Image (cartoon, rainbow, N blue to C red):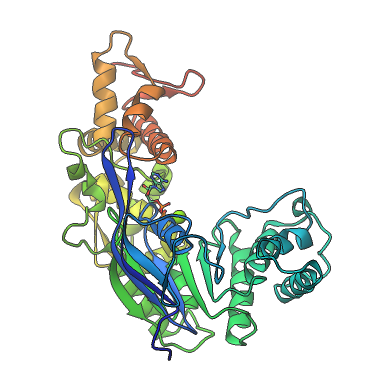
Amino acid sequence: MNAVPLLDVQNVSQAFSKPDGDQLVVLEGVNVTLREGEIVGLLGRSGSGKSTLLRVIAGLNLPTVGEVRYLGNSVEGPADGIAMVFQGFALFPWLTVLENVQLGLEAQGVPAAEGRQRSLQAIDLIGLDGFESAYPRELSGGMRQRVGFARALVVHPNILLMDEPFSALDVLTAETLRTDFLDLWCEGQLPIKSVLLVTHNIDEAVQMCDRLLIFSTHPGRVVSEIPISMPRPRNANDPRYIALVDRVYSEMTTRRNGEQRPGGRVERFPGTGIGTILTHVSSNLLSGLMEAVAEEPYRGKADLPDIAENLQMEAGDLLPVAEALQMLRFAEIERGDIRLTEAGAQFVREETDERKRLFSRHLLTYVPLAAHIRRVLDERKGKSAPKRRFADELEDYMAEEAAEETLRTVISWGRYAEAFAYDDNQQAFSLDNPA
Ligand code: ADP
Ligand code: MG
């Protein structure tokens, strides 16, 4: 193994200025090393700063503190040996597959004839032979993402950064592309030396990686490292595999000093607490998970990967549901298990109307934004308030998209609980039947 790692991320922090002038610290003291021959996975919840870290490594963001060293040299702009595959397809619709792939080489000043030759090879390698002259709109999502891979591979980068490259695909397509990529990697056919894969999909991480880094949220920091030495292909029924998934789950759900509990981000913004990001989870999923945990064989306490499989859900998709239940104090998550609270167990026993009353009580008690909206509506003469007003407030704490999702979540929970109403046309909250 080389003495100098391919990539060395040293003590990187990244902060952004919020509209009110305060700093949002997204990454803090991040250290990551990447060596030749390995696929390293970076697992963290949504919003934990994974994409930001990749942008820093690719030289697209300059870190606030710290340094990225590539082959021993400081990265201060886009580096030639580092390429990225994005979550979306990001193809130019007016260019053919071949032209889209060739683009990266032109930027590097490779002569046209050689560029064409190498692009055709990359297209062939990734399984798009015969589609060189097709336009993106003529391709399925899976094929479009293959173009994204070809475009990154054609420059023969030492390091391939992948930002949730399979998450925009349907389950089967993602599985096929993942397997194809892994086969090529194992056969040594890919013109790359090392991969950093960002994902929130625990199974994908355990399938693909030699080493996993678990990322905490607020701020993003590497809190744990899990080596995986199982030979590939890895069988999901192998007890070692199951134990690994369990361990990753547990690491991702352990509360650490300094890290906000998912339900406790409230403390981050003393006085209001409305700045908590709410991931969108439907009330149906919330009650569905509570019911499943209450039933046999779990009777109130379940291992999360186990119940995910039982519900035929991706482990990674279940976590936000469990976190929402924890925030609402209907359940607690600890060390990879979910346990219903007294209130959660009661919710499951009740009929619809009583469920809604209970949900409303918890929503208005434990979700500060919901309480805030309700208070504003109560105080207003017309018992209504435009969404814009709350969006403006939230944007002091979070990016616009996060504010949008947070509002979408509180709207759907508020509607279910009948805690307040929301008119999509007017884009306004109101109290239908002021209590
Ligand atoms: P992840 O990829 O883990 O979901 P991101 O790196 O996209 O997370 O974002 C982490 C946080 O940083 C989010 O709260 C996001 O709103 C914020 N963020 C990312 N880029 C910027 C930016 N350019 N300006 C302000 N905030 C940003
Ligand atoms: Mg991201």
Percent of width and height locating residue 4:
40, 84
Q: Nearer the viewer, residue 133 or 4?
A: 4
Percent of width and height locating residue 163:
50, 61
From the viewer's perspective, is residue 312 above or below residue 428?
Answer: below
Name which quarter of the figure residue 74 lies in. Answer: bottom left
Q: Disc count in the image?
A: 0
Q: Quadrant of the C terminus?
A: top left
Residue lying at the far top in this picture: please name it. 381
Q: Nearer the viewer, residue 309 or 364?
A: 364
> Which residue is pictured at 38% across the width and 38% down the height?
406
Name which quarter of the figure residue 141 lies in. Answer: bottom right
Q: Quadrant of the N terminus?
A: bottom left
From the viewer's perspective, is residue 226 above or below residue 300?
Answer: below
> Which residue is pictured at 27% across the width and 24% down the height?
374
Asked if residue 101 shows in the view, the reply is yes
Percent of width and height locating residue 65:
30, 58
Q: Would residue 269 appear left or right of 392 to someone viewing this image?
A: left
> Which residue is pictured at 48% across the width and 69% down the height?
197
Percent of width and height locating residue 245:
38, 74
Residue lying at the far bottom in this picture: please name it. 1
